[in-house]
Image (tube, helix red, strand yellow):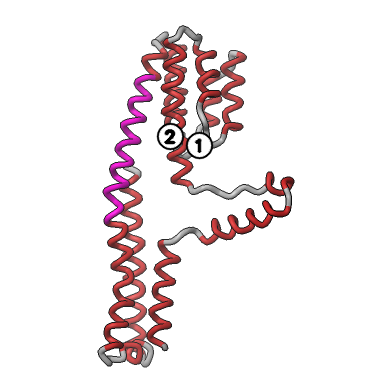
Amino acid sequence: MTLVAAALLTALAVWLWTGPDAAALRLGRLTRRRYERGPRVRKTLVARPDRSRRADAWRRASIELCHAMTAELSAGRTPGEALTRALTAVDFPDPDGLRPVSAAARDGGDVAAALLRAAPEEGGEGLRRLAACWDVSLTAGAGLSALVDRVATTLRASQTHRQDVAAQLAGPRTTAKMLAVLPALGLLMAGALGMRPLAFLLGGLPGLLCLTAGLSLDACGLWWTHRMATRAANL
């Protein structure tokens, strides 16, 4: 029974390390409960989306915005009209945050500053580059359509690169998770052979030192693999 409990605890620790965020799960359950109570509370509580998915959604929306704006400019629209119509045609993760951009483009305000303020920290590269294009077009008189089209090409290439990197990192991530579970399987195999590994690990100071060192190395391996994968994905 002790061996089985140790294996279950090890599997639980691995799941907590590599599984979903516990705070996000609790917030999701709280949101569902409040959602069932009435529409008034439903509007005040919204489940927090995953940061990486939200950043990807912003990047995809920025690419669509550049394509839509290029089409509007090619049709003879003014830059302000083109941006206003393109913003209404694209589904952004946070449409309310782009209302100042639409107002600035419609009323002749500082569009570049509004784009910079609306750009999120993660996934807002497209909006920041679009703001730079707007400034260059106003100060140097460069063609805005060509600049926006070049930004769309660059963003699309970057998105393809990130998807390729994520696909290549899926194997190492899975391998790291499987290797983290191997110590628990080793304990089970040793117990099946009658070696009583827990008696050694929990029965004295040398065993406790070995157990502590093993768990620490296992946790460090998971952390290091996650860190390397995250850095590779952000290159």
Whether 169 is among the magenta residues is yes
In three-dimensional space, the C-alpha distance between marks 2 and 1, rounded to whole angstroms, equals 10 Å
Q: Say few, some or many: other residues with alpha carbon within 10 Å of mark 1 (under 14 / 14 to 19 / 20 or more).
A: some
Magenta part mainly helix, strand or loop? helix
The magenta span reads 149-171
Question: In this orientation, which residue lies closer to the viewer: 30 or 35?
Answer: 35
Residue 25 against residue 69 in the figure, above or below: below
Residue type (three-letter) at the residue carrying disc 1:
Pro
Which residue is at the front of the view, 234 or 172? 172
At 27% across and 55% down in the image, what residue appears?
171
Q: Residue at x 45, y 44 (%)?
A: 53
Kind of residue at badge 2:
Arg
Please name the residue that numbered disc 2 is placed on: 59
Rendering coords of residue 6 (x, y %): 40, 81
Image coordinates for residue 94, horizontal then vertical, percent: 56, 35
Residue 63 covered by magenta stretch: no
Query: Residue 233, position in %: x, y?
Result: 33, 46
